[in-house]
Amino acid sequence: MADQALLQTIARAQQTLRAAGRLRPFHRGNILMAMGEPSGEVLLVESGLVKVVLPATSGIDVLIGLHGRGALLGELGILEFRRRSATVIAHQDGIATHVPGQAFRDLVHRDRDVRALADVTQRQRLHSADRRQLAVASMNVRARTVTQLLDWAHEYGERVEDGLAVRGLSHRDLAGAVLASEKHVDAVLGTLRGAGLLRTRRMCFVLTDLPGLASLLG
C-alpha cells in the first residue's frame, strides 16, 4: 500500500512539473547538461535514455548511471544553487520536460508531491553511490562487470531469441561504469564469451545465460 501511495505521489509530481515546463526533443549525443556550468533548469525524462558521466583525465569517462522515462535530473544543483556536478548526454533519442530552476524551487517549497519526488530522487542517488563504492571496495573487475551487465539487462534489456540484448552501450561505456580499464574489461568479456554466457557486437551485449552469469557472483 505504501509503495502504491508513493507511485501516486510521484505521478502527481510529474504532472505538476509538466505543467510548469516545456517539452523538447533530444538526440543521441546531445549534451543536455555540462559539468561546471550554472544550474538553470531541471529535466524530467519523458522518453529515450540519457547517461550521466564524470569526465576523467584518463580518457574514459566515469559512467555514473543511465536514466530513462520518469527520471528527474539536475534538481540538486537548482536546490543548492550549485554548478552542475556531472555531464548529462543523450544516449538514445527522446523527449524531456525542461522546468526553469526558479519554478522548480517554488514548487518544492509549496507542493508536497514535488518535494517528495525530489527527496526520493536524492535518496536513490545516495543509494546508487553507496552501491558503487561497495562494489569497488568488495568486488574484482569480473564481478563488477557481470553485476553491471545484469543490472542493465534487467532494467533496459530487450528480449531476443537467445537472451537479453543491451543495445547502444560500448565497451568503453562499460569500463567507465565499473571503474576499470577498457583493456581489463575486454579481457573479462572475452572470458564470458568463451564460456557461452555472452555475445557481443558493436554497441550491443547479448546476455545468453542470465542464471550462469548470476552464478559467477556466488
Image (cartoon, helix red, strand yellow):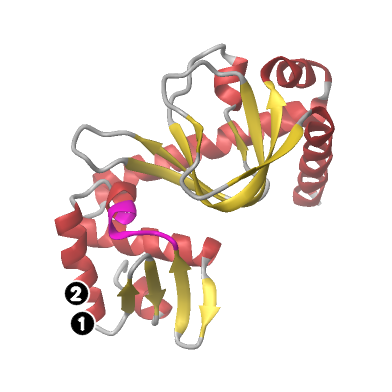
Q: Position of residue 197 (x, y in %)?
A: 32, 80
- Judging by the rendered image, the residue that carries numbered circle 1 is 194
Q: Which residue corresponds to the image point at 24% horizontal and 69% vertical from the top-left?
A: 189
Circles 1, 2 touching at the beta carbon (< 8 Å): yes
The quadrant where residue 105 appears: top right
Q: Position of residue 84 (x, y in %)?
A: 48, 22
Q: Amino acid at mark 1?
A: Gly
Q: Amino acid at mark 2?
A: Thr
Q: Is residue 169 magenta?
A: yes
Q: How far apart are the alpha carbons under marks 1 and 2?
A: 5 Å
Q: Which residue corresponds to the image point at 51% horizontal and 36% vertical from the top-left?
A: 125
The answer to whether residue 108 is left or right of residue 8 is left
In this picture, is 99 found above or below 125?
Answer: above
Q: Which residue corresponds to the image point at 28% horizontal and 53% vertical from the top-left?
A: 172
- Judging by the rendered image, the residue that carries numbered circle 2 is 191
Query: What segment carries the magenta color?
Result: 168-174
The answer to whether residue 191 is left or right of residue 79 is left
Q: Nearer the viewer, residue 1 or 79?
A: 79
The answer to whether residue 145 is left or right of residue 102 is left
In this picture, is 13 found above or below 75?
Answer: below
Q: Nearer the viewer, residue 16 or 215?
A: 16
Q: Which residue corresponds to the image point at 45% horizontal and 87% vertical from the top-left?
A: 162
Q: Nearer the viewer, residue 57 or 71?
A: 57
